[in-house]
Amino acid sequence: LWYGISPLLTVGRDDKTIMRRTSSTLTTTSAEETRALGRALAKRLRGGDVVALHGDLGSGKTTLVQGIAHGLGVKRTVNSPTFILMRVYPVRPARHGIKQLVHVDGYRIRDEREFDGIGLADYLGRPDTVTVIEWPKPTQYASTAWQVSLTAGAKPDERRINIAPPPRHQP
């Protein structure tokens, strides 16, 4: 499915992807592969986790979130919250206590105080919530969130995706 697989992700004989403990860069060659990577990442997320997505416009951030949402059990269509800034999706049935996915787009937000203005603080760290933030501010969640960087590859649908888990997910 992916090439460039390193210690972070391995594909087992049953085609289930298992996340491991170190940072890793993978390459996907289609939107569906990017979504599949999101589904694999969802299997590792715990309630209270924050995922910080970094990347240029069109790098595949929302596509990855669609996969995360599907992997968590979100049934609704996931779209970029660019103009409304934040969307909350129910997870049904709840998976490992996770009842909702909060998807935030910080592109139009100028500073960290504006994140508070949209009510983000009400969701962060909740044991029943996973929060995914596109365009986080530089210092925001630097040491406590999953750090995911997406860049366009050499081919039109190719994406290079670096995933680094937060300390609480490392042994």
Image (spheres, rainbow, N blue to C red):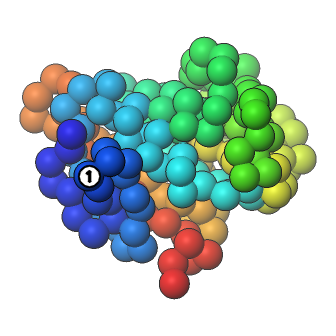
139 with respect to 13 (left or right): right
Q: Residue 160: where, in percent of width, then height?
A: 24, 45
Q: Secondary structure at mark 1?
A: loop
Number of labels in the image equals 1
Using the image as rendered, state which of residue 41 and residue 149 is in the foreground: 41
Question: Could you classify mark 1 by the number of other residues whose Cα lies within 10 Å: few (under 14), some (14-19), or many (20 or more)?
Answer: few
Name the residue: 72% across, 20% down.
84
Using the image as rendered, state which of residue 138 and residue 15 is in the foreground: 15
Residue found at the far front of this picture: 14
13 with respect to 71 (left or right): left
Using the image as rendered, state which of residue 10 and residue 102 is in the foreground: 10
Name the residue: 54% across, 37% down.
71
Q: Residue 24: where, in percent of width, then height?
A: 30, 63
Q: Is residue 42 visible?
A: yes
Which quadrant: the N terminus? top left
Name the residue: 34% across, 65% down.
8
Q: Amino acid at mark 1?
A: Arg
Q: Residue 87: where, in percent of width, then height?
A: 73, 26
Q: Residue 39: where, in percent of width, then height?
A: 47, 39
Name the residue: 60% across, 15% down.
77
Residue found at the far left of this picture: 154
Q: Quadrant of residue 27?
A: top left
80 with respect to 110 (left or right): left
Judging by the rendered image, the residue that carries numbered circle 1 is 13
Compared with 163, 132 (above or below) is above
Q: Quadrant of residue 139?
A: bottom right
Residue found at the far bottom of this picture: 171
Using the image as rendered, state which of residue 137 and residue 67 is in the foreground: 67
